[in-house]
Image (cartoon, helix red, strand yellow):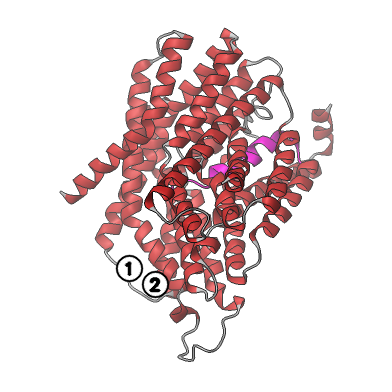
Amino acid sequence: MFQIKNKFLNQLFGSCLDLLPIFVVVFVFQVFILRQAIPNIGDMAVGAAFVVLGLTLFIQGLEKSLFPIGETMAYAFAKKGSLLWLLAFAFALGFGTTAAEPALIAVANEAARVASDGGIIEQSEQAKNDYAFGLRFTVAFSVGFAILFGVLRIIRGWPLHYLIIPGYVGVVIMTFFAPATIIGIAYDSGGVTTSTMTVPLVTALGVGLASAIKGRNPMTDGFGLIAFASLTPMIFVMAYGMVL
Amino acid sequence: MELLNELFSTLLSTIYDVAPIIFIIAFFQLFVIRRPFFRLNDLITGMAYVLLGMTFFLVGLDKALFPLGSAMAQQLTSPDFINPSTDQSISIAWQDYIWVYIFGACIGFATTLAEPALIVVAIKAQEISGGSIKARYLRLAVSIGVAIGISLGAFRIVSGIELHLFIIAGYVIVIIQTMFSPKLIIGLAYDSGGVATSTVTVPVITALGIGLASTIPGRNPLLDGFGLIAFACLFPIMAVLAYAQFADWTSRRASPKETEQEGE
């Protein structure tokens, strides 16, 4: 009991240290550069306390739930030896976590506005909604595909950079053919798909698989799933812009 | 009371976000693997911690950081701050935005250090590597990468240079670095870009991008505001690869014999 309490306090202290730089930056810029007072000090203090508490709980919770479950499921799949189910799981995980991602929904709506202002689609609500919806599903599909492909890579032991570098080349080639309005959105979409919830689970899956399969090293083979998930959306979104 | 309401509605939307993950895990565990969950109690308390933690984290950010951060981004980019003289005919040069670049670098560095996904991935990497990768240094490297990326991205918006030129140059550098990097770090380095841009960093830098693109004459906020996230995603890869090369180099210099044995 005593140890658990200690660990929690340790984590709480760590969270304070992690968040200190943000408050220092905000304070210094607000007071010394913009030369303004900090508004609503009370709100700020409550917010800061919430952030510290939230970060502490989140990290503790992850170590108890998503991390172990990702790894035990990876072991179970490796033991079961059913490649098809494992790939289905990988795809579902990538697709399911991305389709509902709030950051992606925001970016898709923004993109629909750009497209409609640029005259690519009609200037009606219906057309915009269709466009945003299509974009979201394109990205979700591409992340599902990325995790599936990344899992296949871990199983086969392909070196990561032989796959990522051609991906970069693909992005560059697509850039020359995609409409100019979509390029910024496409480049950004890679970063917004991998959220705080998805990253730990996908990392645990990759590392678990790489340690369960003989001849794979969790360090060299276990990482890289997120890299695929941030690369494929760029290519797929540019393709979406070209088709429409 | 208002605070309670906010907490409750954030909790609901967090549950909504997590629901697909839980559903997929439960489906595959129960119907495909067909085994009960290992340590179900721990899982449930852990999940409750995750949900509660995320809720407090988001509400706290909303209270303490996001409004002030966006307001600051807007003020730093506004013409009143950049060019206080009343003569608006003096055109603004890219050097006038120096505080924007510094702010972008500082806030990018600070928000990345607080990024929960990065914290847990760094802990994991330290565990797996048996301590040869230090979680703290890894996070510092990623944060420095984001800092450089955002200030360069801000410079790009101000100068109006095409986005893809920077990104292509970045890819070329990453490819060259990959050829000279220790194999162990490559996966982690490539992952770090996507990990760095999450809950804390994205909203703040989006506000910065929109603020910049909407106040600079001749920029279209809808077109030129994008791209900062791409920068923040690309530069951590370089920073982590550089950190690995540096660590490799120093350890080789310190004990040339030991590394030779390891290499065999």
Q: Which residue appears at 33% of the width and 56% of the height?
A: B64
Q: Marks 2 and 1: CB-CB under 8 Å? A: yes
> Dot 2 lies on which element?
helix
Instruction: Tell me which amino acid carries mark 1.
Output: Ile
Q: Which residue appears at 44% of the width and 14% of the height?
A: B29
Between residue A198 and residue A171, name the one nearer to us.
A171
Q: Which residue appears at 40% of the width and 70% of the height?
A: A30
Judge from the rendering whether residue A145 lies leftward or rightward of residue A24; answer left or right.
Answer: right
Residue A31: mark: 2
> Dot 1 lies on which element?
loop
Q: Position of residue B15 (x, y in %)?
A: 32, 34
Q: What span is in magenta?
A: B181-199
- Position of A238 relative to A206 (above/below): below
Give the residue furthest to the left: B1
Judge from the rendering whether residue A240 lies leftward or rightward of residue B7; answer left or right.
Answer: right
Q: Position of residue B63 (x, y in %)?
A: 31, 55
**In magenta segment, residue B175:** no
Q: Position of residue A144 (x, y in %)?
A: 54, 30
User: The numbered mark 1 sits on a residue in which chain?
Assistant: A
**In magenta segment, residue B185:** yes
Residue A38: mark: 1
Judge from the rendering whether residue A3 lies leftward or rightward of residue A201; answer left or right.
Answer: left
